[in-house]
Amino acid sequence: MGLRHIARACLATSLALIAAAGLAACSSSKPRAGASTPATTAPVGPPATTASTTQCGAMDEILVEALNQTPEGQAFTGLPEGASDEDTQTAWNAFTQALETGYHARLQSAAAGDAAATSAVTALTTYTSTTSRLAAGQIPEFKDEAQAEKDIKLGRTPEPNPEYQRSLDARTDAHVELSTCMPHWPVTF
């Protein structure tokens, strides 16, 4: 098994842990009745819970609009039942990039200086940039990848890369913050 394959497996595991942490932190978010894809809360339709502030509510409306109107949002919400976790995560990542690129100014305007909403806009940038870097393998999971491969083959635990863990933590915190401000932000994948 090559290091790249191991890294992908570890990234999938890490993303699953992030989703679990998000679920635990945001258990008050509930999917709209009948509107979910496997392992994904489909964030469309009327809010399942109330946004934390009026500004967050306005941002949530922009999120729902983007999900309904962008090709990336439609691809995510239109995933067939039984879609793989990888397909779901890939579609979500494409959507969040489109949201950050195409709707950032509107989200910032909707935040209107509200602390929670403004922080959620910043969290979106953190979430998308960190996700991109992790998915592209720009942040190695282990300090020394060659040694990590040897350690794994020998059944030892490789030395983790602190930057990788900090990035996972930042992405998890951003995910929790976004799902708290915008109830239609999916909690799990």
Image: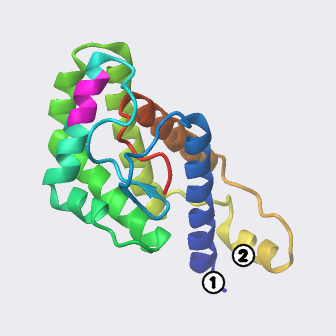
The outermost residue toward the bottom is 1
Instruction: Look at mark 1 in the image and give the residue it sits on.
Output: 2
Q: Is mark 1 on a helix, strand or loop?
A: loop
Q: Where is residue 75 in the image (x, y as percent from the top left)?
A: 25, 65
> Which stretch did the figure color magenta?
56-61
The outermost residue toward the front is 33
Q: Which of 149 and 127 is in front in this view?
A: 127
Q: In this view, does 71 lie above or below 102?
A: below
Q: Nearer the viewer, residue 7 or 102?
A: 102
The answer to whether 134 appears left or right of 153 in the picture is left
Can you tell which quarter of the image residue 65 is in?
top left
Q: Position of residue 176 (x, y in %)?
A: 50, 36
Circle on res. 92: none
Q: Position of residue 129 (x, y in %)?
A: 37, 47
Q: Which of 169 and 40 is in front in this view?
A: 40
Instruction: Inspect the image, locate mark 1, and give the three-letter code of the amino acid beneath it.
Output: Gly
Tell me which label, 1 or 2, sits earlier in the chain. 1
Can you tell which quarter of the image residue 11 is in?
bottom right
Q: Is mark 2 on a helix, strand or loop?
A: helix
Circle on res. 149: 2
The Cα–Cα distance between marks 1 and 2, rounded to whole angstroms, is: 8 Å
| Residue 134 part of the magenta-drawn span | no
Tell whether label 2 touches label 1 (CB within 8 Å): yes
User: Residue at (38%, 55%) from the top-left corner?
Assistant: 34
Q: Position of residue 153 (x, y in %)?
A: 80, 80
